[in-house]
Image: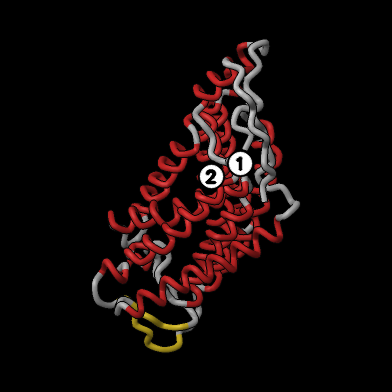
Amino acid sequence: MDDAAAPADSTDPFWKRVWQFPLVAMMAALFGLAVVFATLTLVLSVAFAGLAPTGVQIVNGLAVPVVTVVFAKVVLTRLGERPRDEFAFPGAVRQVAIGLAGSAALISAIVGVVALLGGYRLVGWGGATSWPLLIFVAGLQAGFLEELLFRGILFRFLEDFGGSWFALALTSALFGAVHLSNPNATAVGAIGIAVSAGLLLGGSYMLTRSLWLPVALHAGWNMTQGMVWDVPVSGNPVDGIVEAHPAGSVLVSGGAFGVEASVVAMVLAGAAGAWLIVLAARRGEPMRPLWVRRRLQREGAPVPVEVPAA
């Protein structure tokens, strides 16, 4: 990333410099997101009143990704000192394919190791009745909306302010903390989410500077663990293709919260996230804090050459 490029122009009006300040831009983005999705919720509740729960899940799962992408392209491309398109279409198909396949392989490997350690017991075939919830809510809706919020807004503007490591640490901790409100939540589960998902999703965003890969990783992870392996999704019970139950030590199985609270997930997914972060660092993607970039600019330090995102 161009670590010192596109600083605020000191000749800009004071109001513009304030408006472009990362934390102000972040608050504006959060306010806009809240207004847009409150409006969407109201419109859908009126337009589809009386629709069966499964229908509601499908409608929401299809509407949220569209509104998310439009919001990012219309609003986020106009905020901050370095506006950019978080959902650029070139390379999107490749990133989505890698994300879906990679997350499916990773969560399957985690379930496999947990099973070898006695923490996952396969009973037989399940009813797969949770497919609308897993595909449209835990998959599409959560993948797009949560990644827009945590990576596209919070990570992006916190990074612009305090640098990449500050943003990675804070968004990972916040991502884990919000899952404390989930069913069957535990402190260990929140830590597991922060370590595994926080590093994995934050690292994928740092590497690509796009939301397509984090969205696909998030959606593929949730759909595979619930739909294929019948593992609770962040504490939410599901009915997958097979029927399975946690067994043995909670630290191995994750208990009722699911394998995301397992030390196995923390190690394997955390390692995958660390690998993505290392790749990003090798490409020069990590950003210094705002005050450091300002000082380097005043000192006339050479501006790094920007490396195009994959």
Q: Nearer the viewer, residue 254 or 43?
A: 254
Q: Nearer the viewer, residue 268 or 190?
A: 268
Q: Amino acid at mark 2?
A: Ala
Relative image position of residue 248 (x, y in whole percent): 24, 76
User: Which is nearer the N-term, disc 1 or disc 2?
Assistant: 1
Write the residue at 59% across / 62% down.
99
Relative image position of residue 115 (x, y in whole percent): 36, 79
Q: Which residue is mark 1?
A: 36
Write the residue at 68% across / 52% down.
66
Specify the farthest residue to the right: 90
Relative placement, left or right, of 95 versus 114 is right
For disc 1, the neighbor class at 10 Å (few under 14, some 14 to 19, many from 20) is: some
User: Looking at the image, is mark 1 or mark 2 nearer the viewer?
Assistant: 2
Are circles 1 and 2 on residues that touch, CB within 8 Å?
no
CA gap between label 1 and label 2 equals: 35 Å
Relative image position of residue 221 (x, y in whole percent): 51, 65
Relative placement, left or right, of 189 versus 13 is left
Label 1: state its secondary structure.
Answer: helix
Q: Amino acid at mark 1?
A: Val
Specify the farthest residue to the front: 302
The answer to whether any part of residue 50 appears in the image is no
For disc 2, the neighbor class at 10 Å (few under 14, some 14 to 19, many from 20) is: some
Q: Which residue is mark 2?
A: 281
